[in-house]
Amino acid sequence: MEQVAPMPQLGGTYALAASHNTDACMLALGIGLLTRLVARSAQPTIAVSVVGDHWRFDQAMAARSTVREFDLGVPHRFRRAVDGKEVRSVVTRQGAVLTERAVQNGRTTEIIREFADDQLRITMRISDTECTQTFKRTA
């Protein structure tokens, strides 16, 4: 009989531990040089809380903090943490993975958030550009 891995705890607080190609993703989103420089030096934390299908992300950075709430499968609008621009989005869940499809100015971005016991890995794809951020669980 195949053993199924236990579901990791999804809620918690995570601090940025590593990032790869993030500047290229910000450039693909049309984020200007000064904002990219500030974001590049930021060490964000994300507090995730989950109640049923309702999710809340509290993201804190030195330059800006944001709160984002949504229900799975329900289209919603939010302001991007890095530059405050409004984006339309829908988030779905399969196990410990959230998949988000966001649209801004006709361009679709896919964001995959993979939860594990000790980390949150975020992969963002914009056209042929991909970046990753790994956050370690702190609480």
Image: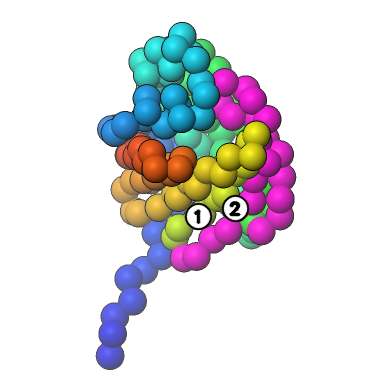
From this view, report whether residue 105 is shown above or below residue 90.
Answer: above
The residue lying toward the viewer, choosing from 62 and 100, is 100
Image x and y of residue 16, in percent: 35, 31
| 122 sits left or right of 74 in the view | left
Residue extending farthest top: 34
Residue that numbered label 2 is attached to = 91
Q: Is residue 134 visible?
A: yes
Q: Is residue 63 above or below residue 23?
A: above
Q: Residue at x 36, y 15 (%)?
A: 41
- Pinpoint residue 14: horizontal percent, then vertical percent: 40, 37
Q: Using residue 80 as the reference point, say whether residue 115 is left or right of it.
A: left
Where residue 139 appears, as percent x and y from the top left, is 40, 40
23, 114: nearer the viewer:
23
How crowded pointer 2 is (Cα within 10 Å; few <14, some 14-19, many 20+) is rated as many
Residue 68 is tagged as none
Residue at position x 40%, y 52% in the image: 114
**Can you see residue 65?**
no
Please tell me which residue is depicted at 44% across the width and 12% down the height of the picture: 33
Residue at (63% x, 36% y) in the render: 104
Tell me the tag on residue 98. Answer: 1
Q: Is residue 50 magenta?
A: no
Q: Is the C-beta separation of discs 1 and 2 under 8 Å?
A: yes
State the residue lying farthest toward the bottom.
1
Question: Residue 137 sits in which quadrant?
Answer: top left
Element at badge 2? strand
**If the image is split into quadrants, where does the N terminus sit?**
bottom left
Magenta region: which residues?
A: 73-95
Q: Which is nearer the N-term, disc 1 or disc 2?
A: 2
Q: Amino acid at mark 1?
A: Leu
Which amino acid is tagged 2? Answer: Val
